[in-house]
Image (cartoon, rainbow, N blue to C red):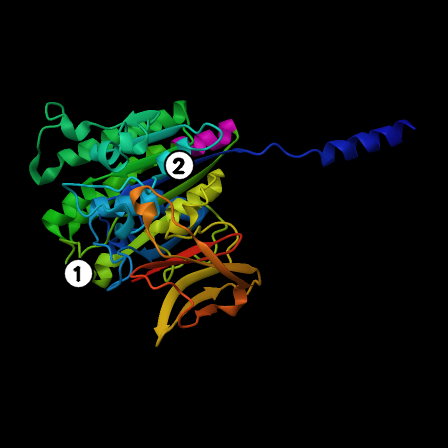
Amino acid sequence: MKTKLITLLLAALTALPMTARTRKALYVIIDGIPASQLERLKPPVLSSIAREGAYSRGHCGGDVGRYNETPTISAIGYSNINTGTWMNKHNVRGNSNIQANYNYPTLFRLAKDQKRPFTTAVYTSWTDNRTILLGEGRPETRHLKIDYIVDGFDLDKARFPHKDGDREVLDYDAATCKGAAECIANHAPDLNWLYLWYTDDAYHINGHGHIGDEAIMSEDSLLGQVWRAIQKREKEHDEEWLVIVTTDHGRQYDGHSHGGQSTTERTIWMATNYKKVNGEFSPSRLSHVDIYPTICRFLGFEIPEEQRPELDGVSFIGPEDIYDLDIEPWDGDVTLHWKHTKKRVNADIYYAASNNYASGGSDRWVKVATVPSTDGSYRFKAGSLPKASFIKFAVITSNTALNRWWK
């Protein structure tokens, strides 16, 4: 009898659910590092992160020649990542005179809209990232409040006077990383953004060469203290951290400038410690806008129903069903084409003949059909769509939402 009771007790204990590790996320943008130079140098910290998970090239810049073509410029790249949308939506069009469309919520505003509280942190060498791009404290962002802030070094000319070759920017980055490591070690916010600047200036001034190499290795070394703080948190506090490191744009062939749509300017790279990435994490598919839905899935953020068809990216972790939605007009017909993972699930087809979302309103999404995802296409016959100068399409499954504009 005693043996039987012990056996039953052990079985009951085994059946109890394991307590999930607390999930945290950090995304890092290191400005303007060409993929070719990073891959040649193999910086040790970034290599360590990638060895735990994965590394891939990807793209920025939207679709060349289409409505969402997006200049390969710094603040625009940050906004691609922060909002999960291209420039036609977030409306950040350069590094100055920024008129962001806050109706496309950043990750930070979405975090604060969740049912349970999430703490947030920004560590950045350029203060405008917080005050303008994230819009902290602005009425348009419902007075967004960041819980932990490490920035302002670029505004402190007494502490950080100008140095030859803009090397004071490296000092900003050093102070930023030190503060980030300390904050993560002591407070472990749920959502963290770290931005490092110096590499972009080094390349603008010098192009490809030994100074660019030194800049990459210096930034990698600074990142090391943040990475070690995360590893320590995971070991000592039963936490699971998602780390994503990327760059905001590539560069022209000589390494000096950027902003256009050449292959080298559009090419970015991404490293993550997440082990089981899906097919989105591949050179032909991966882009800036995939970071937003990836972090949302990892942290368990609920994305509002009206926002879901506005996101331009796809999570590179977890299940996936469809990808690469496009539009093909033929005489009066309009056909939606997409690719699929050979897993047959329901795909709902929608259209909206307005874009009120961009101005803070709502769009009437009309569901027209449900088809197997493996069909890979849906045709609107001539006359089946309203006569409108602008139409949005969406194809949505339980795991994926894709959208395209037609105008």
Residue at mark 1: 253
Residue 111 percent coordinates (x, y):
41, 34
- The residue lying toward the viewer, choosing from 384 and 97, is 384
Q: Determine the secondary structure under disc 2.
A: helix
Amino acid beneath label 1:
Tyr
Label of residue 365 in the image: none
> Would residue 130 be seen by someone viewing this image from the given angle?
yes
Q: Give the camera-side residue of 34 and 392.
A: 392
- At mark 1, the secondary structure is loop
Q: Give residue 169's quadrant in the image.
A: top left
**Up-down: is 319 above or below 136?**
below
- Residue at horizontal 24 percent and vertical 36 percent from the top: 129
Residue receiving disc 2: 110
Name the image quarter holding the C terminus.
bottom left
Q: Is residue 236 magenta?
A: yes
Tell me where the magenta segment starts and ends, as one range: 229-237
Q: Residue at x 31, y 36 (%)?
A: 194
Nearer mark to the viewer, of 2 and 1? 2
Whole-percent x, y for residue 390 in the image = 31, 59
